[in-house]
């Protein structure tokens, strides 16, 4: 089947898991308090808190131990304390909910623009993006990280600004990556039949969801990725880097 379009995951696919876990996420934990205090009066911070509050209220009906976010009638200090507990709790579980991911993108903005953070990319990524786009393929990103966070990573990457190679970006606003409907929605949105799309990811649950939607899939085996079990290795094609990917 001819591939017209590539849909790329980030963490574990274009970028190492250790960069996300050991650099990006600790940055959020270090800067969260000052981000809230310094930008308290901004609409962006207030919107982020409202989204986290709604999510926490919904979560509390389904699971135990969710730190709730203080009402907007409470003092800024109390609300900030409750936001910090909630965000740390959600990050401890690496939750991929939109409210958390939006806030993270807003906090990373400063780190990327000051040069404190540079987006990690595996060395084969830039060459592959050049090759694919020069041969007429469209390349999209689909990550649990917010669209803003994705753009920051590729704009301020170790290989320079690579944003020019992408035809578009998707995040969890279109749906979770483990749900097949998300891939159907992406297919509709980019006006491309599912079987013309090749999705590259590190996670079997995402591969299964994309496959169910009729999208073609390859699993990446990058250094530091979780090992794939025998059943998944039988079911999906794998590759170690983007150089191994042959598009017809
Ligand atoms: C691009 S934002 C940083 C990574 C992140 O927060 C994340 O959740 C990555 O998830 P992915 O879907 O790219 O594996
Ligand atoms: Mg991933």
Image (cartoon, rainbow, N blue to C red):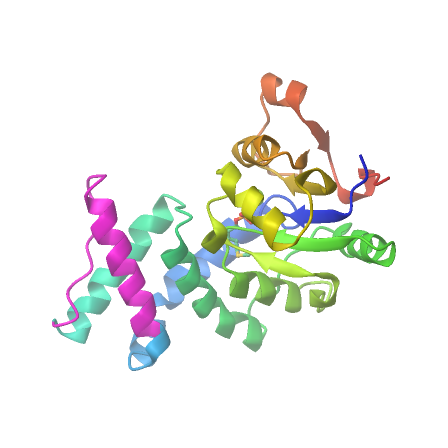
Q: Residue at x 63, y 54 (%)?
A: 141
Front residue of this view, candidates 63 and 192: 192
* Residue 39 horizontal side relative to residue 206, left or right: left
Residue 143 x, y percent position in the rendering: 55, 51
Q: Is residue 48 above or below residue 9?
A: below
Is 110 part of what is drawn in magenta?
no
Residue 147 sits in which quadrant? bottom right
Is 66 part of what is drawn in magenta?
yes
Farthest residue toward the bottom? 41
Front residue of this view, candidates 27 and 74: 74
Report the span colored magenta: 45-73
Q: Residue at x 64, y 60 (%)?
A: 168
Residue 139 x, y percent position in the rendering: 72, 54
Image region (quadrant) for ligand 2: top right
Q: Residue at x 49, y 67 (%)?
A: 108
Q: Is residue 154 above or below residue 206?
A: below
């Amino acid at each position: 089947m001819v591939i017209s379009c590539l849909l790329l995951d980030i963490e574990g696919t274009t970028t190492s898991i250790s960069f996300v876990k050991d650099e990006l996420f600790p940055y959020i934990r270090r800067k969260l308090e000052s981000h809230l205090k310094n930008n308290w009066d901004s609409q962006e911070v207030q919107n982020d808190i409202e989204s986290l509050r709604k999510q926490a209220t919904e979560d509390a009906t389904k699971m135990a131990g969710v730190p709730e976010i203080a009402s907007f009638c409470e003092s800024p200090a109390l609300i900030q304390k409750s936001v910090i507990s909630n965000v740390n709790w959600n990050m401890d579980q690496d939750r991929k909910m939109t409210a958390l991911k939006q806030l993270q993108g807003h906090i990373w903005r400063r780190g990327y623009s000051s040069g404190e953070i540079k987006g990690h990319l595996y060395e084969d990524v830039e060459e592959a993006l050049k090759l694919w786009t020069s041969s007429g393929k469209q390349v999209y990103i689909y990550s649990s990280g917010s669209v803003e966070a994705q753009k920051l990573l590729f704009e301020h990457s170790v290989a320079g600004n690579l944003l020019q190679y992408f035809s578009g970006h998707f995040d969890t606003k279109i749906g979770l990556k483990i749900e097949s409907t998300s891939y159907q929605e992406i297919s509709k949105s980019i006006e491309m039949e599912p079987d013309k799309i090749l999705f590259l990811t590190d996670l079997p649950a995402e591969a299964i969801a994309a496959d169910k939607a009729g999208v073609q899939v390859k699993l990446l085996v990058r250094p530091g990725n979780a090992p794939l079990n025998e059943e998944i290795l039988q079911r999906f094609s794998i590759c170690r880097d983007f150089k191994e990917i042959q598009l017809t």
